[in-house]
Image (cartoon, rainbow, N blue to C red):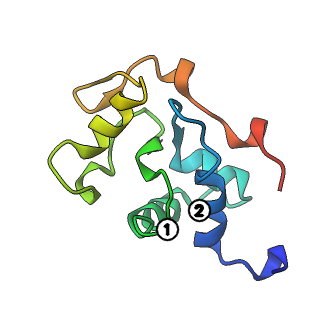
Amino acid sequence: MKPETINFFDKVYQVARQIPYGRVTSYGAIANFLGAAKSARMVGYAMNGSHDKEVPAHRVVNRKGLLTGKHHFDGTHLMEQLLESEGVKVIDLQVQDFDAVFWDPSKELKF
């Protein structure tokens, strides 16, 4: 499949699958990497629809490290539990040491 025929959500999923274990990125960082800087919300919509696509959506948070997508996961604290199982510390639904665990696809990937 040619890259130009892949829809935006599929591109988001390709990027999200590259987020390393124990790291997080933001909706905006993915949008920026894909050349759609104002589409962070669309990345969020993609993450919401990703649960049957083997995408580590729990590793995508907002620009401040908040677990804004938590209500899209089964269970009360599943997103937080998944991150903590990877060694990411979360307090009050916010990733701690955000700069240290932040993964920027623009610095790590080339499509």
Of residues 86 and 31, which is closer to you in this image? Answer: 86
Q: CA distance from mark 2 to mark 1?
A: 8 Å
How many discs appear? 2
With 46 as the anchor, is 67 left or right in this view? Answer: left
Residue 82: where, in percent of width, then height? 34, 39
The residue wearing badge 1 is: 53
Dividing the picture into quadrants, the one containing residue 50 is bottom left
Tag 2 secondary structure = helix
State left or right for residue 46 relative to residue 1.
left
CB contact under 8 Å: marks 2 and 1: yes
Identify which amino acid the numbered label 1 is placed on.
Lys
Mark 1, secondary structure of its residue? loop
Q: x and y percent of residue 57 in the render?
A: 45, 52
Can the viewer see residue 32 in this picture? yes
Residue 74 position in % (x across, y down) = 21, 57
How packed is label 1: few (under 14 Cα within 10 Å), some, or many (20 or more)? few
Query: Which corner quadrant of the image does residue 51 belong to?
Result: bottom left
Question: Does label 2 or label 1 sit earlier along the sequence?
Answer: 2
- Determine the residue positioned at 84% across, 49% down: 110
- Label number found at residue 97: none
Q: Residue at x 32, y 29 (%)?
A: 94
Residue 61 seen in the figure: no
- Horizontal arrangement in the rendering, residue 108 relative to residue 65 (left or right): right
Q: Nearer the viewer, mark 2 or mark 1?
A: 1
Instruction: Give the position of the N terminus as an image quadrant.
Output: bottom right
Q: Nearer the viewer, residue 87 or 4?
A: 87
Q: Which residue corresponds to mark 2? A: 13
The picture places residue 99, in percent across and down from the top left corner, at: 54, 21
**Dividing the image into 4 quarters, which one contains the C terminus?**
bottom right
Name which residue lies at 46% across and 42% down: 59
| Vertical placement of residue 65 versus 44, above or below | above
Q: Quadrant of residue 102?
A: top right
